[in-house]
Image (spheres, rainbow, N blue to C red):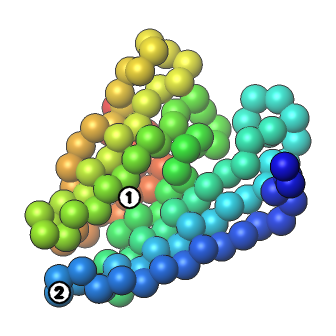
């Protein structure tokens, strides 16, 4: 198995209904050893109709014990579903299980997800 040793970016653009959705998933290699350092980081940026809507990590959130399990975009419902957990607290304790609207001006970031506790 080859170890990720360089940053990689995967981009995709789709039109779903009347919405244009551009995604960029960036994989960063591990930076060290131990908790957090031995894990690669995965960052997601999503623009909906040209406006940045999501700019956060998927998986482990640096600087804490939180992990974003999924972000699901449903243009037909005008909704973005987010599920995140506290890994160090009560097992499977949700810190964010909410719905945002695509036309809401709020930018979804790591801090936004943590503030949703």
Under circle 1, the secondary element is strand
**Residue at position x 55%, y 19% from top?**
88
Rendered position, 19 above or below 110? below
Residue 108 numbered tag? 1
**Residue at position x 26%, y 51% from top?**
81
Mark 2 or mark 1, which is nearer to you?
Answer: 2
Rendered position, 12 above or below 65? below
* Quadrant in the rendering for residue 63: top right
* Quadrant in the rendering for residue 65: top right
**What percent of the width, then of the height, locates residue 98?**
24, 43
| Residue 19 visible in rendering | yes
Identify residue for label 2: 18
**Residue at position x 41%, y 37% from top?**
84
Q: Is residue 47 left or right of residue 35?
A: left
Residue 83 numbered tag? none
Q: Is residue 13 left or right of residue 39?
A: left
Tell me the distance, in whole angstroms, between the alpha carbons under discs 2 and 1.
Answer: 22 Å
Q: Residue furthest top?
A: 90
- Assess disc 2: are there few (<14), some (14-19) or many (≥20) residues with their C-alpha within 10 Å of its C-alpha: few
Rendered position, 61 above or below 56? above
Q: Give 77 or 48, whichever is nearer the viewer.
A: 77
Q: Give 11 or 61, whichever is nearer the viewer.
A: 11
* Quadrant in the rendering for residue 29: bottom right
Q: Residue furthest left?
A: 77
């Amino acid at each position: 198995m080859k170890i990720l040793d360089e940053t990689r970016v995967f981009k995709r653009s789709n039109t779903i209904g009347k919405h244009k959705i551009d995604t960029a998933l960036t994989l960063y290699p591990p930076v060290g050893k131990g908790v957090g350092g031995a894990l690669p980081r995965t960052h997601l940026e999503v623009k909906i109709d040209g406006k940045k809507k999501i700019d956060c990590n998927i998986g482990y959130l640096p600087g804490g014990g939180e992990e974003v399990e999924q972000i699901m975009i449903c243009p037909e419902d005008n909704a973005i579903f987010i599920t995140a957990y506290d890994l160090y607290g009560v097992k499977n304790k949700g810190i964010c299980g909410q719905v945002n609207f695509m036309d809401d001006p709020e930018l979804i970031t790591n801090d936004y997800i943590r503030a949703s506790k």
